[in-house]
Amino acid sequence: AGWDRAWATAAEILKRRPEMAGMLGSSWFYDPPLEQISPRLAYLRVNPLKNGAFLIHQGPGDIHTQRAATSSPTRAALIEKGEYTARSWIVAWPRAALIKWADGRKAAQMAQAA
């Protein structure tokens, strides 16, 4: 998945920049209800959380609602009915945990290719 590649690239940056404590991302697509509403997006939140990241709630906002509704008729309908409010979350992935995950991912890919 594209976001896994992005996080793996972030880990490579961290290896070269020891002064960095980790990486951050912020979006409505880290919103926990999406695991049921849009299951195909669940990996965006679940993968980092299973591997040492943590979330910080930022809250709702018109921009998050607009973005969440744009590409999904399901989310748009739930928002329209007042059954879902998109909320933004920060995902914070500490340095050591992100590098460990990325190294494990790389090892698994190499083993699979062999």
Image: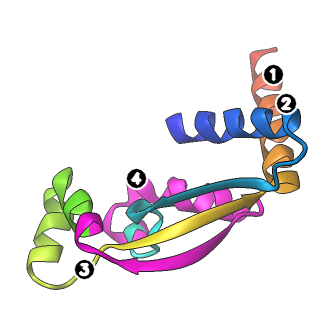
Q: Secondary structure at mark 3?
A: loop
Q: Would you say the residues marked 3 and 1 are in contact, meaning their CB atoms lie under 8 Å apart?
A: no
Give the Cα separation between the discs numbered 2 and 1.
5 Å
Residue depth check, mark 3 versus mark 1: number of the one nearer the observer? 3
Q: Would you say the residues marked 2 and 1 are in contact, meaning their CB atoms lie under 8 Å apart?
A: yes
Q: Mark 3 vs mark 4: which is more N-terminal?
A: 4
Give the Cα separation between the discs numbered 3 and 2.
39 Å
Q: What amino acid is at disc 3?
A: Tyr
Residue 105 in sight here: no
Residue stretch in magenta: 35-64
Residue depicted at 88% across the width and 53% down the height: 96
In the displayed structure, does residue 26 sit left or right of residue 52? left
According to the image, label 2 marks what residue?
107
Residue depicted at 42% across the width and 70% down the height: 88
Label drawn at residue 84 = 3
Give the Cα separation between the discs numbered 3 and 1.
41 Å
According to the image, label 1 marks what residue?
110
Residue 91: image location, x then y, percent: 60, 63
Q: Secondary structure at mark 1?
A: helix
Furthest toward the top, the residue is 114
Residue closest to the eye, 14 or 111: 14
Give the Cα separation between the discs numbered 4 and 1.
26 Å
Label drawn at residue 40 = 4
Quarter holding residue 21: bottom right
Question: Relative to residue 100, is residue 110 depicted above or below?
Answer: above
Give the Cα separation between the discs numbered 3 and 4.
17 Å
Q: What amino acid is at disc 2?
A: Ala
Residue 51: image location, x then y, percent: 75, 58
Q: Residues within 10 Å of mark 2 (few under 14, many from 20)?
A: few
Residue 46: image location, x then y, percent: 59, 62
